[in-house]
Image: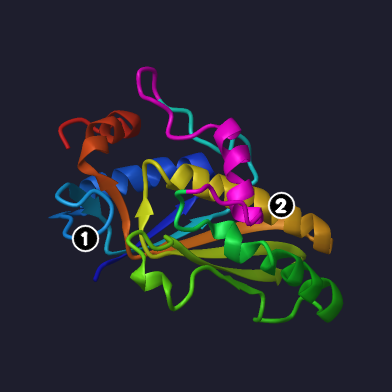
Amino acid sequence: MKIEQVEARDLPEAWFLCLRKTLTQGREYIIDRGSNVGHRRKELDFIILQVRHPDSRPLVPDVPQGVPPPSSMEYVENYLQYLMTSLRAEKEQYTYGEDLADQIPELIRLYKEDGYNTNQGFMAVGSKESIKLSDPPCLRGIDTRVMNGKLHFIAYFRSWDLWAGFPSNLAGIQLLKEYVASEIGVEDGEIMALSKGLHLYDYTWELARVAARLEGV
């Protein structure tokens, strides 16, 4: 497996850099199981993304005219409830908030009462039963670190839709991080994100090329 590393200043830059890398270096294959069976994906083997200033606004990318935006702050603010509360619609198999809602206050308590120098501030998503779902959670955990007076988040995605998921996921995670940082009394820090499945579906390739300003790819 090839390890790709991307360093970005902010969340929109991270998205555009990942679009270019996935379009030009992603492995192309036909999906046997999962979302959009029978479609093709372009996918990176494994990516390590570092965003130095994820708090910079805007949190979502501004795309060229004629390209439908992959997200909006209105959508992100609505999505935030699926990260921070146990709310779940009738037909949804899961939400991240079902697992995170009870862990967020415990994470805050851990840092406020026990101090910052710990490796135990990890919030898990999913369970041993998740593998039985037809659509198991993509985000599987958020690890945390307080260093030099700043709170950093490290998120792992088992599979990650670069077009329809990445912008909203990271913007929502950033808002969650800002909330936790304010509660424990530290500054906001970086986001690290890792995935062995960052991908683009074939029906988004042309939009992605236009957004990334890549011609002939």
Q: Is residue 184 above or below residue 215?
A: below
Q: Position of residue 130 (x, y in %)?
A: 41, 70
- The secondary element bearing badge 2 is classed as helix
In the image, residue 3 sits, relative to residue 206, either above or below, namely below
In-image side of 139 versus 104 (left or right): left
Q: Is residue 153 shown to the viewer in this render?
A: no
Tell me, for residue 57, which label it has, or none.
none
* The residue stretch that appears in magenta: 64-90
Could you tell me which residue is drawn at 57 percent across and 39 percent down?
A: 76
User: Left of 27 or right of it: where is 190?
Assistant: right
Please tell me whether residue 66 belongs to the stretch shown in magenta. yes
Q: Is residue 151 above or below residue 171?
A: below
The residue tagged with tag 1: helix, strand or loop? loop
Q: Which residue is mark 1?
A: 33
Occupied quadrant, residue 20: top left
What residue is drawn where x is 55% and y is 35%? 75
Mark 2 or 1 closer to N-term?
1
Q: Amino acid at mark 1?
A: Arg
Q: Nearer the viewer, residue 4 or 134?
A: 134
Q: Is residue 113 above or below residue 136?
A: below
> Can you say which quadrant of the picture contains the N terminus?
bottom left
Left or right of 90 on screen, residue 122: right
Q: What residue is disc 2 on?
A: 178
Q: How is the image coloured?
A: rainbow
Residue drawn at x 77%, y 65% is 149
- Give how far across and how far down residue 134 sits, in percent: 32, 61
Quadrant the C terminus occupies = top left
Residue 87 drawn at (x, y percent): 61, 51
Please give the name of the residue rendered at 43% of the width and 34% of the height, measured from the top-left corner.
70
